Every structure is written in C-alpha cells, then in structure tokens.
Image (cartoon, coloured by chain):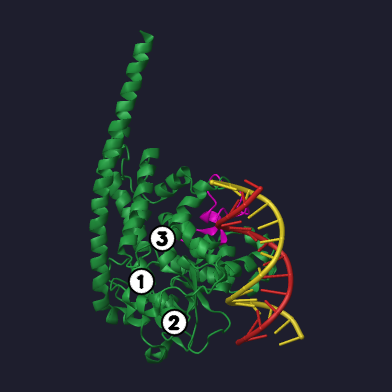
Chain colours: A green, B red, C yellow
DNA sequence: CTACCAGTAAACAAGG
DNA sequence: TCCTTGTTTACTGGTA
C-alpha cells in the first residue's frame, strides 16, 4: 500500500481514537504533571544535594511507578514513552524526534520490532491488527509516509517471524481469517523494553533516548532538575523497575533480548511457546485495571488467552480479566460478534484508561463487575509501590555511595594538584 | 573472515 | 479480480 493510500486506512479516525486514548490514558499523576510543579525535586536545591535528596528519588519513584502503572492498564506502554506521556497524543513524530533529531522524516532509530512493539503497547488492548500497526507507525513516524512501501512488508515480516509477537484470531472459527490481532508476548516484553532502552544508546545514529533525551523526557515528567548522575540513577530505577516487573512476571526466565530475538529467525512456528495451560497458570490475579472490554477476543483461542492472561500478568495490564476468559459465547454480545474492538469501539466506554489503577474506576459495567477485581490490582500496586520504595532506598544508598566517591575523587584530585603545585 | 542480526524484496497462499 | 494479510525464502549490509 502506498502512502497515498493511507487515507483509506483507518488512519484518520485512528488518530482521533488514539488521541482520546491518550487523554484517557493520562497517568494519575498526569494531572499533577500538568500542574506547575515548582516544588519539584531539587527545584533549586544545591547540586550536591540532588543525589541525596530523597525528593528527586521520590519523584523518580513516582515516575517509575507510573511507568509500571502505565503498563498496568493504561494505554501507555513503553516505559520511556510513558515518561513523556503527558496524557496527550504527544507522540507525533516526537516519539523519536528528540531535540537532537531535527528531521521528523528521518528514519526512526527503532527497529521494526520495536516499532511494532510500541504500536501494540500503545493500543488500549495491547493488541492491534496489522493495519492499525501501520497507522500507528505512520502517525508517529512520518518517515514512513514517504518511504517506499516495502516497510509494510517488513512489518508483516517481523510480525510473522518475531516470536515476540503473537497472532490472535479476532473471532471464533477464524483460524486463518483476514486481519488477526497481534500482541506482544509478555514473556518477551521485558526484553523489548530493554531493547527500547538500549537501542538508542547502542545505535550511533539515534540519540533520541540519549541521556539528554531522557533528561528532557524526565523533565517533562516532573523531574525537572536532573543532573547526569540523576539520569543515571533514573535509568537505573527504570532498569530496576523492569526487574521488579520481571519478578512479578510469573514467567521468569526472561531471555536476553538477543536470545529472544534470535529465536524469531528460527522460521519455525512462532506459536509453539507455552501452552495455554501454562499461560493460565501464569495468570496472576493482579490484573485488569483496565475494564476496557476488549477482552472479548475469542476466548476459544489459546493465543488469545495467552495474550490476555499473560499480558495482564506481566504488565498488570489492560485486559479485563473478568472477561478475558469468558468464552465469547457467554460474553454478552454488546460488542458485536467480533472479538476485536478498535478504539472506536471502546472509546465511549472507557475512561478506564484514565483509570490509574489506583483510582477506582466507576464506570458502568466495569465498575460493577470490577469491584472485586479491582482489589487485586490495588494490592499489587501497593506491593509494587513498596518494592519501589525499597528499591528507591537502595538506590539512594547507591547514590550516596556514588556521591561519596565523587567527592573523594574530587578531593583526591585537588590534593594531587596541590601536590604538583608544590 | 565469520556469524549474527535487521532490513528488504519477492513469491505464494488464503481470505474478504 | 483485486487487495490485504500472513508466511516463507533469499539476499544484502552492518556490526561484533
């Protein structure tokens, strides 16, 4: 499909839909973020205090908590993007268009796998049909609007080949029907996230997520006066956060990204991974903050269950567990026969996305059946919060050590200089 | 030099 | 019939 055909894709509506989602998806603190936070972090604290000042850590912690929560039922997805998420459809080309990246039409610094990952993760359901993946990419990366059409082939190629992505049939009986949904295998999610974080640093041509970028991103998200060391710490927090998430994942053994991505080229069946049973087992009660009812994915589909259950496990994610295992037949067909719901389908029913996971969601259906289900996520969030606090403590400790080392080094340097002068 | 990976092109099949 | 989607194979270029 040529870029000019884009109009015929749901791109336009999509944008609107996504916009809404983004709005809805604002983090709980997004509102806060919008507020002028002059108080912030070391707003003007002495430089030396910045590391040892718990405030910034706390902020980072909040930030990272948001990240977690972001994957916990918000439309936001990839940590780093979450960070910048201000609840607005802020991505545009911005996704990679950092200040250092003047050209919005430059080739994105992300691999197709990551682009797909981002697209999927930014969907409220964590599942997207190819078409919408195209749209998302086109929206965020204008480069592709003018790029040769082969990129779509590459996207599909990636989806097929990459084990990180799993196909989910939209509805019952359709095994090979047209337009399946694609979601990210939660098992590989950490790896993808890691790749996302790493890539810009490992890729010379992309500075989009360089410390500077991260810095600006963090600034956008409330942490306003970060020094490089802070950024390091924040990065560490992010990684830490990831590891916590990994702990939470019942599917431990996240393969090193390389490994996981390598698998993709095994040209074997991409869906030979864990069985439905395993998936079921790995299903954690902590899930579904998102009443988003896209859970109607054909429950008969193993892949669907996998997607739904594991997604909710790994990311405290978006699929309403109350529904996700409900056989479609019994799922009250208010949603029509197809399991898939695009943003349009759900847009009116969900501020769920705005549902932070902390704030109880009082919305029709979801609120009703959600009550019991909400508790768990809250508990989980609380646990996570505790973990984050602990982690923050540890990090603070490390930061303190680092500061000490820094001052020792500078002292040593000063002394040696004195020495030389003598 | 080799192996690996990502990207690209293309052929093909299935389905709408 | 055409288009989209999905799979597979082959090839190329970059990188470690």
The residue pinned by badge 2 equals A297
Disc 1 from disc 3: Cα separation: 14 Å
Residue located at (46% from left, 60% from top): A192
Residue A311 visible here = yes
**Residues tagged 2 and 3 counted as in contact (Cβ below 8 A):** no
Q: Earlier in the sequence, mark 2 or mark 3?
A: 3
Residue A353 image position (x, y, % from top left): 38, 69
Q: Quadrant of residue A42?
A: top left
Few, some or many C-alpha atoms within 10 Å of disc 3 (few <14, some 14-19, many ≥20)?
many
Q: Secondary structure at mark 1?
A: helix
The residue pinned by badge 3 equals A190
Disc 1 from disc 2: Cα separation: 14 Å
Residue A312 tag number = 1
Q: Earlier in the sequence, mark 1 or mark 3?
A: 3
Few, some or many C-alpha atoms within 10 Å of disc 1 (few <14, some 14-19, many ≥20)?
many
Q: Secondary structure at mark 3?
A: helix
What are the residue bounds of the magenta stretch? A88-112
Residue located at (25% from left, 58% from top): A385
Residue A194 image position (x, y, % from top left): 44, 55
Q: Secondary structure at mark 2?
A: loop
Q: Is residue A326 magenta?
A: no
Q: Give the camera-side residue of A312 and A93.
A: A312
């Amino acid at each position: 499909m040529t870029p000019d055909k884009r109009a015929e894709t749901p791109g336009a509506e999509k944008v609107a839909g996504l916009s809404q989602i983004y709005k809805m998806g604002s983090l709980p603190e997004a509102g806060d973020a919008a507020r002028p936070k002059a108080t912030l972090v070391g707003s003007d604290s002495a430089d030396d205090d910045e590391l040892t000042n718990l405030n910034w850590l706390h902020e980072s912690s909040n930030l990272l908590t948001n990240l977690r929560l972001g994957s916990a039922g918000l439309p936001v997805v990839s940590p780093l993007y979450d960070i910048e998420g201000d609840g607005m459809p802020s991505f545009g080309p911005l996704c990679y268009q950092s200040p250092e990246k003047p050209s919005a039409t430059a080739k994105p610094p992300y691999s197709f796998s990551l682009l797909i990952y981002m697209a999927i993760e930014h969907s409220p359901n964590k599942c997207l049909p190819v078409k919408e993946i195209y749209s998302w990419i086109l929206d965020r990366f204008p480069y592709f609007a003018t790029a040769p059409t082969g990129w779509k082939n590459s996207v599909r190629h990636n989806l097929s080949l990459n084990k990180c992505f799993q196909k989910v049939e939209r509805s019952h009986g359709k095994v090979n029907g047209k337009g399946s949904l694609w979601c990210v295998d939660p098992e590989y999610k950490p790896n993808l996230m890691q790749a996302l974080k790493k890539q810009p640093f490992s890729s010379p041509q992309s500075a989009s997520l360089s410390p500077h970028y991260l810095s600006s991103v963090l600034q956008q998200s409330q942490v306003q006066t970060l020094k490089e060391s802070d950024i390091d710490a924040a990065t560490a927090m992010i990684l830490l956060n990831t590891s916590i998430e990994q702990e939470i994942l019942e599917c431990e053994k996240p393969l090193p990204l390389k490994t996981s991505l390598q698998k993709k080229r095994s040209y074997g069946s991409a869906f030979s991974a864990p069985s439905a049973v395993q998936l079921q087992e790995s299903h954690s009660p902590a899930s579904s903050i998102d009443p988003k009812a896209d859970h109607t994915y054909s429950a008969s589909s193993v892949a669907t269950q996998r997607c739904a259950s594991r997604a909710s496990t790994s990311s405290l994610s978006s699929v309403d567990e109350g529904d996700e295992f409900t056989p479609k037949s019994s799922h009250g067909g208010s949603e029509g026969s197809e399991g898939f719901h695009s943003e349009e389908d759900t847009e009116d029913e969900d501020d769920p996305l705005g549902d932070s996971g902390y704030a109880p969601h009082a919305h029709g259906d979801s609120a009703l059946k959600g009550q019991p289900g909400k508790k768990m996520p809250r508990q989980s969030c609380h646990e996570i919060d505790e973990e984050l606090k602990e982690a923050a403590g540890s990090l603070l400790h490390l930061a303190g050590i680092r500061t000490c080392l820094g001052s020792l080094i500078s002292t040593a340097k000063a002394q040696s200089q004195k020495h030389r002068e003598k």
